[in-house]
Image (cartoon, helix red, strand yellow):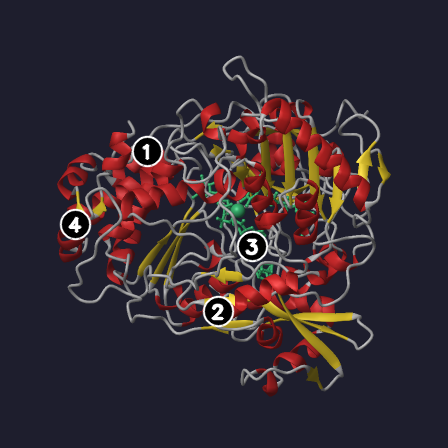
Amino acid sequence: MAKNRRDFIKISALSAAGVIFGGSYLRAVSSDKSLKNGKPLYEVPEKLLRTPTYCEVCFWKCAGWVYKTEKGAIKKIIGNDIDPACNGRLCPRGTGGVGMYNDEDRLKTPLIRTEERGKQTFREATWDEAFDYIASKLKKIKKEHGAECTALFTHGSGGKYFGKLLKAFGSYNIAAPSYAQCRGPREVGFIATFGDGLNSPEPMDMRDAKCLVLIGSHLGENMHNGQVQEMSDAIDKGASIITVDPRLSTVAAKSKYWLPIKPATDLALLLAWMHVIIYEGWYDKEYIEKYAVGFEELKEHVKPFTPEWAYGITTLKPDLIRKSAKEMANAAPSVILHPGRHVTWYGDDTQRERAIAILNALLGSWGRRGGFYRPEKAKLAKLKLPAFPKPARTWREAMGGKFELADLALANGVCDATIPSPRMDCHIKAWIVNGTNLIKTLPERQKTIEAIQSLDLLVVVDTMPMEITGWADVVLPECTYLERYDDIRVSQGREPTIALRMPAVAPKYNTKSAWWMASQLAKRLELDAWFPYETQEEELDYLLKKMGTSLEEMQRIGVKRWERAYDDIYFAPNEEVEFNTNSGKIELYSTALEEAGFDPMPKYTAHEEPAEGFYRLIYGRAPMHTFSRTANNPNLVDLMDENNVWINPKVAKEWGLKTGQYIWLENQDGIVSEFPIKVRVTERIRWDSVYMVHGFGHSNKKLSRAHGRGASDSELITRVHVDPIMGGTGMRGNFVTFRTENKKKA
Ligand SMILES: Nc1nc2c(c(=O)[nH]1)N[C@H]1C(S)=C(S)[C@@H](COP(=O)(O)OP(=O)(O)OC[C@H]3O[C@@H](n4cnc5c(=O)[nH]c(N)nc54)[C@H](O)[C@@H]3O)O[C@H]1N2
Ligand SMILES: Nc1nc2c(c(=O)[nH]1)N[C@H]1C(S)=C(S)[C@@H](COP(=O)(O)OP(=O)(O)OC[C@H]3O[C@@H](n4cnc5c(=O)[nH]c(N)nc54)[C@H](O)[C@@H]3O)O[C@H]1N2
Ligand code: SF4
Ligand SMILES: [Mo]
């Protein structure tokens, strides 16, 4: 174990910043005392000006300051000290965010397609031409098919404005891949148990946890800033970490217990943990009695699931299962079984998340210090707008009554509802895609492309030429987050907090903000009543004044925090708590799942194993990149310019593979990776799996740094296991084998 367990996090967070800006420079600025006392400061000694922002490199949205020279050259971005999401420190990606602004491959002007879809052949257009084209197509679709035959896919700040546009137009088909390809199952699993989802940032009291259990969550590589910091604080205070991962992740290497589980068998481990905790009497009896229902049923249900039973499935020794359960029980209630975030793995994900929720309940950590706290959120003021028209249909109809428990639209559901089918009398005809590279983001690429090919209109709003822009009819170039205002950031947390993003510099090239684009389109679609302001400053000032501040104040302070209205962050001793479930209690036995025809308590089902010569494809994050969006960022490419495939030495020997060699991966359906990937032979991965970082292997030639670098996990995920409860797309049931040559290319 490392001498100072905090080092690994410091290294990943700071060395990167050091590379980009020079370590001493960065330290000099962040130790500037005048930043600490919360006073607004427009000028710093180096004669730099600063403006507030929040980061868009990932969705943690850390608030920060952009420093620039008087001439408007951006020098650096640093964290805002009073923002609880970052506590004054950005991660390497946030520090390198200026690369998004500087990237010379950026989209520069609106584009209209001239050849067939997918070919990246466009002509440059004016904004007026682009908007007229879109508006006339949308009007035609509305007339011929109905406004509800349109959809928005979004994963970015501007989604709010396009969402409003679409609702005003008459469609509620608004989907984000951050639900059905990411955290959806955990929301549904926790709602079924506690009556509340987790949302973002997750209300985990990590800094006071005495034991943290990470099931696949690879914090430290997953750089969600505030969480990584709180984990490192907890470690410094002596908390123990238990990591369940088929791979020795960064954090697994620092853990008291690493459980190198056979992938796809987590539910067996979770049931065995329940068995031990219940039958050894290690659960929180008072808490369960007071707050929960279904304990006797659960006790009976988990009776057969002994650690010995789980050993045969998970390959984890019974003793390790018992010891780790004891470790959690000793720390309870200051223990967190982390729900994870990207949890769409094997199709039974809502049930796995239910099991995680139930374990947290048994240990009494929900509502307790060092467990899960009650979050607070500032109430965002609303504009006075007319009511939205009620759409004749939504994507749900196309689902034929399935996935009723999904609380948000499914991106894959909207995709399904776009492909013509005899089951449906109408399918979706137009998509607006904002800030999501659907070709790399949705599994089953062929299906996404089939859906796109049956559209009458595809509008893509992006900052970069990406795989998705190649399929667009119209490309609208957004300016980067450093060049625009956006909506007020209202994040939940221990206290209500808001943050402002404002332009640090004027937009480069002929790029514009999503707010402006949506307002302009609204004018052409006669929907201006929903866009009453001429400028975004006026709109923000109106909203901020209603929230007790103003645009002028927020421009100076960037972040505003309020005290909690009530002192109720944890359950008070003996507090009567009403949970938002059918029974008003924590449901160990879920009546809602039972009513909907699903197992009221989680069960283990075996998943398909790789065939001879194939290995399970698992994927994750690298600290210096976000999905596919940073692969061309000049600053971050300097830190990592391609991904590699982790292969166990035993397997490498069998195949004669060596570290550094380039190979192609071929999946169970015969799909070969378009580009080769470098081999990394390592004991840190089980022999039955291979691992790679998501986001590489770009095929768009306009990405001068990212094109052809590394391979894409997405193209190999041609098989999904859909969660029957909420429609999430389990993506880890794909298997690959190795090719030392690519016949198609040879
Ligand atoms: N194979 C595979 N698929 C996955 C995952 C995986 O690990 N592997 N992860 C899943 C998860 S957890 C998630 S949350 C999703 C994420 O999915 P996405 O959010 O789609 O991820 P990105 O690939 O980064 O695509 C973001 C797009 O937004 C653009 N963009 C960046 N900044 C801006 C901006 O300011 N304005 C606009 N308009 N566009 C901008 C980028 O250029 C890029 O094209 O993917 C899911 N899909
Ligand atoms: N640097 C960086 N940080 C990010 C992001 C980013 O793009 N870059 N994206 C953010 C987003 S949107 C999300 S959703 C999160 C995702 O991050 P997390 O929710 O932390 O991680 P996952 O993608 O679910 O899981 C990846 C880990 O699961 C392990 N794993 C694979 N199969 C199994 C299995 O069967 N069982 C178990 N127990 N483990 C398994 C892998 O080895 C890997 O370590 O990261 C966030 N943070
Ligand atoms: S965690 Fe990093 S990339 Fe994400 S918002 Fe914060 S600084 Fe930006
Ligand atoms: Mo995600």
Which image quadrant is residue 49 in? bottom right
Separation of residues labelled 3 and 2 (CA atoms): 14 Å
List the single residue furthest toward the right.
Answer: 123
Callout 4 environment at 10 Å: few (<14), some (14 to 19), or many (20+)? few
Foreground tag (1 vs 2):
2
Which image quadrant is residue 679 in? top right
Determine whether, in the image, residue 215 is placed left or right of residue 523.
Answer: left
Q: Is mark 1 on a helix, strand or loop?
A: helix
Report x, y in % for residue 691.
Answer: 57, 41
Determine whether, in the image, residue 683 is placed left or right of residue 303.
Answer: right
Q: Residue 280 carries which label?
A: 4
Report x, y in % for residue 372.
Answer: 33, 59
Mark 1 or mark 4: whose residue is earlier in sequence: 4
Q: Residue at x 27, y 41 (%)?
A: 272
Queried on whether the Cβ of the residue with tag 4 lies below 8 angstroms from ligand 2, the answer reads no
Frontmost residue, 464 versus 474: 474
The residue indicated by pointer 3 is 59
| Kind of residue sitting beneath label 1 | Gly
Queried on whether the Cβ of the residue with tag 3 lies below 8 angstroms from ligand 2, the answer reads yes
Callout 3 environment at 10 Å: few (<14), some (14 to 19), or many (20+)? some
Report whether residue 14 is seen: yes
Frontmost residue, 577 versus 132: 132
Callout 2 environment at 10 Å: few (<14), some (14 to 19), or many (20+)? some
Q: Is mark 2 on a helix, strand or loop?
A: loop
Task: Name above or below for residue 465 compared with residue 290.
Answer: above
The residue indicated by pointer 1 is 312
C-beta proximity under 8 Å, tags 3 and 4: no
Task: Name above or below for residue 195 compared with residue 699.
Answer: below
The residue indicated by pointer 2 is 84
